[in-house]
Structure formats: C-alpha cells, structure tokens
Image (spheres, coloured by chain):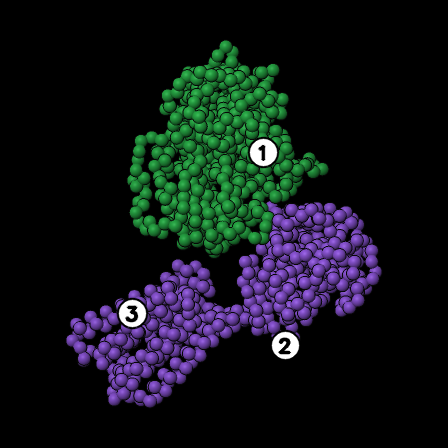
Chain colours: A purple, B green
Amino acid sequence: MEILLLLSVFVIATCGLIYELVAGTLASYLLGDSVTQFSTIIGVYLFSMGIGAWLSRFFKKDLLSWFIQLEILVGLIGGISSALLFLLFEHAASFRLVLYLLVGLTGTLVGLELPLLMNILKDRYEFKDLVSRVFTFDYIGALLASLIFPLLLVPYLGLIRTSCFFGIMNVAVAIVVCVRFKQEVKWATYLKTKAIACIAALVAIFFWADKIMSYSEGVAFRDPVIYSHSSAYQRIVLTRSRLDLRLYLNGNLQFSSADEYRYHEALVHPPMMYSPKRSHILILGGGDGMAARELLKYPEVQQITLVDLDPAMTKLFRSNSMLVGLNDSSLLSPRIKVINADAFQWLKENKQQFDVAIVDFPDPGNYAVGKLYTTAFYRKLRNALTDSSVIVIQSTSPFVAPKAFWCVNTTLQECNFQTIPYHTYVPSFGEWGYVMASPAPLSQHHDQLPAGLRYFTAATFRQMADFTPDMQNRKVLANHLNNQILVQYFEDEWGKYQE
Amino acid sequence: MAIIAGSTITASQYIACSEKRDKYGHITSRISGASAKAGHMMRDGVFHTPTNSTEYDAVIIGGGVAGLAAARILHHRGMSNYRLLELESHTGGNASFGENAYSAYPRGAHYLPIPNTDNQPLLDMLAEAGILTGYNSNGLPVYSETDLCFDPEERLYIHGRWQEGLIPQFGTSKATQQEMKRWLDEMLQLRTVRGNDGRYAFDIPIANSSADPAFRELDNINMRQYLTQKGYQSEELYWYLDYCCRDDYGAGIDIISAWAGIHYFASRKGKAANADNSQMLTWPQGNGRLVQHLQQFSKDKTLDQAIVYKVTQQDNRVAIDYYDMKEHTTHRIIAKACILATPQFVTQRLIPGGQYNHDFVYSPWLVANITLDAIPESSGYQLCWDNVIYKGKSLGYVYAQQQQLFQQMPARQVITYYLPLDHLDPVESRKYAIALEPQQWVKLITDDLEKVHPDIHAVIRDVDITVWGHGMIRPHTGFITGAARAAAQVSPYKNIFYAHSDLSGVSIFEEAFYHGNKAANALVDYCS
C-alpha cells in the first residue's frame, strides 16, 4: 500500500518536471531566445509551486479525495497545456500572459501534490522515514524526466503528445489510488468517472496531435492547409477552400486559382504583343508553370527556358494532378526546358539570347530577393536579350507600395531600358503592378491575341497603362546593391498597410 | 611579416582553459598566416655566404601591397628584368586571404573606402582591375556595383539589441546624440579645411597633407585629450572614437594621436557617381581582390619563402643575400637597385649600419575566420556586412558572404572576427599571442561572441586563426610629425628605395600603394 503511494510520488515528480520542460521548450520554439524563456518559465513554475505548497495548509479533511481530484486536474491541465499553447499562439492578444498563467496554474497544482501526499502519509510513517522516502522518489522521478525528455520524448513523441502522455499518467495515478483506497475515498464513483473522461480527452488529443499542429499553422492562412512542405529554400503551403486553391511561399500568397488568370494573362500577353520576335522565351521564377501556360498558347513560341530556384516547386507543379490541371501541364510540355538554378548565377553563365523574358520573382521583402531587382541584375539580364527583346517585371502593388513600384521602373530606366509601367486588378492580391521594358523604344507589333483568354484584351491594356492620381509616379531612387532602397520602400509601405 | 617571440609565457597565465573544454570539443582550429618561424630565422639565423650570384636590373624585397604595387609600376614603365622576394609562401601581406569550401575570406585588410578623386594613380589601378568602370558626365568615377559594399552595411549591438549603423543611437541620451552630431559636423568641416600652404589639412596620402603647424600640433596630444579639450563628454562618443582608432590603428584613444584620429574621418573626401562618400569597396576575400590584380605583375618573377638577410653595396650595385627555405641554400642577387618594401624593423636589420628606431611601434592583431552552420538570429537590426559590439573586446565580425549575389546561401557561413591585441603593450601582447594554442583562441573568441549570440559555440565548426605580430604601424602621439618617421623616408643609399605604409604612419592600402608607386618610380628614374 505504502509502496503504491510512493510510486505515485515518483510518477507525480516525473510529470511535474515534464510540464515545466514542455512549457520552456514550447516558449523557446514560439517566442525564441531560449535562455530567457527557460529561465523565466522555471522561475514562474517554481514560485507557483511555492504558492501550491502554501495553499496545502487549507486542506484539512478528506485529504485522499482531494488528492485524487488534484491528480485529475493536474493531468488535465498539464496534459492539454502544450496543445492549448500551440492553438492560442495565433489568437491570444498577449501570448506571454496566457503562457505564464498556464505555467503558474500548473505549478501551483503540482506544488500542492507533495505536501498533500505527505499529510496523507504522515500517520503511516515515522516523520524521518517519510521525508526521506518521499524526497528520494521525488528526485529519482526528476532525474528520469530530465533524461527521457530530450532523448526520447521530444524527438519521438513531440511536445503535444509528450504532455498528453504525462497528463494521462497523472490521471492514472488518480484512478489507481481511487481503486486501491476505495473504502477511504469519498465520492469514489464520481471521481472515477471524471478521471476516465479526462483520460479519454487526453487520448483523443494524443491521436490528433498532428491535426492540431497543422491547424496551428493553418490559422496563419485563411483556409485549410492541404499541403505543406519545407524545401531547401522556402516553405510551400497550399490551402483549399470551397472556392479556390491558394499557393503561399513563406506565408506570402502567390496565387488564388479563382483569379490567377488575371495576374498571369496581364503578366505575359503585353510583352508578347510588344515583342517583334517571340520564339525563344525566358521565364525567371514562375515555378508554378502558370506563366508558361500562357506562353504555350502561342504557336510561334519554340522554346521556353524556365529558371526557378526551387526544384520542390517545379516538381510539385509537374506531378500533382490538381496543380497540373491548373497550369495545363505546361511544365510537361516538350517546348519547355526547366532549369533549377539561381537566376543571378544562371544569367552569369548563360550565353543564349531571348526574345521575351518574364521576370516573376517574389516581392522584394528581404535583402536577398532585393538583389534580383537591382541595376546589377538588370544589367546581367540585358546580356541575355537582343536589342529588340521585351521583358516584364512583376513589381508589387502600385496602390499599396507606389514607391516600391516606381522604384522598379526607375531602376530599369537607369539601365537604359525604355519602359511601360502598367497595372491591373487581381481580387485576391488587390491592385497589382508590372513594368514592361525593352532596350529599344516600345511599340506594339502584334494585334492578334491567342484564343481562350478570359481577361486580357488590347482594349484592357490601354486602361492598364493608365495610372490614377493615387498611383502616380513618385520621385524615387534607383535600386542598387549598395543601397537596396527598394527593400526599404517595400517594407515601409507594406508595413504601414499591414498594421 | 614576422612575429618576434619573446620568452615563453604559459597561456594559462592569461586564460583559464580547463573549464568546460568539451563545449568547444567539436570545433576544429589552426593558426595560419604570417610565419613566425621565418621571421625568427631572419633575425637569428646564421647563414653561409652565398657562393653563386645572379644579376637583375631591380629587386623588390617584400610582397605586401607596397611591394606588389612597386612591381606593377616597374612593369608599366617597361622594366622586365626584376624579381620580387617574399618571406612567406605567398604574396599579399596584410591583404592576404584564404578560402574554404564555402567562401573566400580575408586574413587581414578587407575593404577600401571610396578613394579621393585626386588620387589618380589609385583610380587608374582600380580601372585597370575593372573595379572602376568609367566616369560619368561630371567626371565622377563609376564603380562596379558588385564591388561596392552591399546594403545593409553596418549594425551595432548596444543595450541588448542590434541597431542600424555604428554610431551609438539606441538608448542614448539627447545630449549624446547632440555631441555625435557636433562631432560629425566638425569632421565634415575639417574634411575640406586647408592649411596655410594651400594643402588639405588631412589628406591621403599623408604626404600630401598640410605642414601647417596649426594642424600638425594635434599630433602632440592623444585623441582623448583632444576630445576633452573640445568639451566632449558623451561616454558613447568616447567609445565610438576608441573603436574607430582601434579599428584603423590597433590601439585606442589614449595612445593614438589626435591628428591620426581625426585623419580617419577628415582625410576621406572620396566621391563616386554611384556611391556615397561613406561607402566601401569590398569583396569576399577582402583586399585580396586588389592583391590578386597586383600579383599579375610579379607572378613569374616572385621568389617565395626567400629570407633576405643582408643587403649590401657592391661596386655601385646592390647585393641581396637570401636564404631559400625550400632548398635550404643561400643565394646572392646583384641588382642595379632595389626596393625594400619591408617594415622598418626589418629594413633596418637588412641594410648596413641600419638602426631600428623604436618610435616605430606596431600593433599586434588577431583575425579569425569562423565557419559556422548559420549565424544565429538575434533581436534588432538584421545581419550586416560589419557587425560591431558596443564596448566589446573585439571589433566584432564581418560577414563577407553578404557580397554574394545568389539566393541560395552556401551550406555554411564564414564570418571574419577582428581583435586588436591592445590589452597589453605591443611586446607583451605579442608574447601573449604567440603562446596561445588554437583551442585557447577558440575559447577566447567564442566566449566573446556568446555575449551577443548565446550558444553560438554549438554552430561553430571551424576557426582559422591568423596572428599578425606586427599588424599595423601605430600612429601614437608624436609619431606622424616626429623625427623617426621623417628620417626613415629616404634610405642613405642612392640605389636603395623604401616602400612601406609604416613610412606614412598609418596602415592603409592607399598609403602602401602610394609608397610602392613612389619607390618604383624613383627606381626607374635612377636606372635610366
């Protein structure tokens, strides 16, 4: 009988330390700066345990029943703590407050456990034996927890399952004590029922842990996540709603299937109308194959060279049937050559010249991507063009980020390109901008557009090239490697918009 | 460059190394760079008189920037029968560089500020190297965009976070900010001030600076005295200028003269069509890029691992005796003239009757190239080219891969850590440095970096250490205007020419280049 209670001490001690470790690890995962997180979590936790120990004096009778109640509560709160924190991370206004409240609550309950148990056992043991045994088992439990947590639990179970598992252990202690001491325990049936319900809940969370993880990522997105993959270069996420399929790269929307045709038709057809020759086309970026799909509508296009950094992207858009449906198998066409390479690097070594180049990079939101919008880059790109080639650059939103947009235009002009900036409305993006450019003066060479376009017409293009006063040309600097001014414009303007 | 070792002082006197050795157990390290052994051989070796001799028109002793620049002039002025003798197995001196699977990296000097537009010889060399691509309609130089330091350039770790720029701002008082502005305005004004001889008060090369005593007397006080006299009080300003002096001269404001301290700011009048005055030209291999260009003029004419131990006069010619470390033999070269592109403590040892004046003081340095899995993120401004720690022991680190164009970063990163060894006087610092084992350097460097990047030791893979025993000439109080420097400008022999940045009193590329050019031009004039 005593052995059983001492085993409970052992289990309790292990569970108690695990909750603390889980909270510390989770806080460092989600908030960063592991030293601060761990040290504040441990501090709050230990202090709360002190509060728990102090509170134990107020429990005077029915100690065994209270102990069982306590075990169930610790098991439940400790067990769901990490799942809860993952879920709340996106929602809670002050995540730290929630975190410390939860840690404080768990700590207080854990702090109550041993004093209560010692009160229960005080009549069954000599005091010195009691202290010695209880603390021996307590510290052994702590050692076990601190060893298995990094070696087994985090790598094999993950945080959500680890805390669930130890929650279940806590509640199991309650059930065992309840059964073993049924004569001494009041409200035994009620307690047993409660404990079993808690175990059921924790088991459920244990098995749905993966779903919870992806939900917690999913709330960063509007719709359920159907695919997510971290490639060597970026995090690729696909979401699916009743209406559309969306692609996000590093959390930034790349397209919605509901209106991407607007974006891609506006990207591809103007330079095709303006380029005298159009047999050899270069796409930089555009690994989703949508721009290629538009290009393949022209019979005179002999070869498309698509250079995209990430093989994971081009592979996904070549193999997934839903996505292949979206890009009309463009990446499988015999007329396309897909190269997975860094655009700057590739241009440095390229010898070929192209009639049209479609430049569809992510927005210049960081200094690495910003390099692909500099005079240095456009001068390299110029070497891959003839004197009459036409290029187009996706250039972020002239409405949200007019300075960034006009900066792309100015940068191209500084590299002696003639430009036609234009824009269109893409519902999922908002007002979106492009800059068409050529080493030669730009004039329209073709009237005939391919059949089957849903949005773009020559008449539409005339509107596109017109800028309302709120999107008018701003006085901006050209983007150089040694000023990266575009990234600063972009951050200032989009930062304001997102606040 | 040689490191003169003194008595053996055990490293443990300085660093308790026993604690937590395992923390660094996974980090590989080695000390490379200037060979102390070769330097000591030159100093202490007993060599057999050579029995054979070869003849050349000219010989350059020393393959640092001054020597390499001199070779370029000899080539351009039509000489071809010359040799360059270098102690190390490679030329480049302070601008040497290394390379691993992930990046090239500097072992010393790593940038060139936008040059002054009247420094035509330097501009011509940069044009020749393809770094200066032309001039705009206003006559301003256009630099190759990929050779200019990419943005973001500089950040400072202060009060627990990184701020943009090196001038302390985050968490500073209004009074400090006003003093900073006052200081910068003062420097801006001094940049264009001319002395009573019509020359700029502070110019590059230093030889072009005004002789006006009103400015020259600033060499008689140290930088701290100057700041106090001018009524500056801000702790952050004093730190900033101490940092600047340590950065350029390897010693702080208590040692460096006010003239030299101001020169750092006021001499740079560079302009460019496509860069600001404050910007830099830099490359992953640092000034190794410039060295690589200069090396072509002595490529087939360099004798490396050659310890020159004696330079004597012989029938109106110069006899240069050297020891070939590869063959273990001694040789003599007879030349019409020679350039000693060596620091004074070497030069004076080589020439007959030479007397090394101990007013020439050299700052020892440590440069460590650290290969790591990733540079840890930390709060505040993002990773920059130059990353400095407020009140740090070191000058922080430079992230050279910043200068790469590609989206995909190599699997590992290389940062270059700069530590002026100025905690003791130069002689003691040198003894200290030479006594340390690589693992002890690793601990010292990592512990310093952990202050801004806790747990960085876990991602560090390799540390490539370069110790510069005599890294930089030190413009201590009175040196620039002093007798020692003036006396060393010209050799006592008409067929021997000196070329080294220590003759200027500041160790910068422009000065080494200037002295190399000057000596080579004088040599060609002498020979023809």
The residue at the far top in this view is B315
Locate the N terminus of chain A and report the quarter of the image it occupies.
bottom left
Which numbered tag is attached to residue A349?
none
User: Are dots 2 and 3 in contact, CB under 8 Å?
Assistant: no
Q: Is residue B142 above or below residue A253?
A: above
Q: CA distance from mark 2 to mark 1?
A: 63 Å
Find residue B293 and name its label.
1
What residue is shown with label 3? A141
The foreground one among A178 and A40 is A178
Q: Looking at the image, is mark 2 or mark 3 earlier in the sequence?
A: 3
Give the amino acid type for the residue marked by disc 1 in the picture: His
Local packing at callout 1 (Cα closer than 10 Å; few below 14, some 14-19, many 20+) is some
Q: Chain of mark 3?
A: A
Give the structural element (helix, strand or loop) at label 2.
loop
The residue located at (47%, 31%) in the rendering is: B89
Quadrant where the C terminus of chain A sits is: bottom right
Q: Secondary structure at mark 1?
A: helix
Residue B524: x %, y % from top left:
59, 19
Drawn side of residue B52 relative to residue B75, left or right: left
Q: Is residue A54 visible?
A: no
Q: Residue at x 36, y 31 (%)?
A: B5
Please name the residue that numbered disc 2 is placed on.
Answer: A242
Kind of residue indicated by mark 3: Gly
Say which of B412 and B348 sits in front. Answer: B412
Tell me if mark 3 has few (under 14), some (14-19) or many (20+) residues whose alpha carbon lies within 10 angstroms of its own.
many
Percent across and percent down for residue A405 are 68, 56
Q: Residue at x 40, y 62 (%)?
A: A37
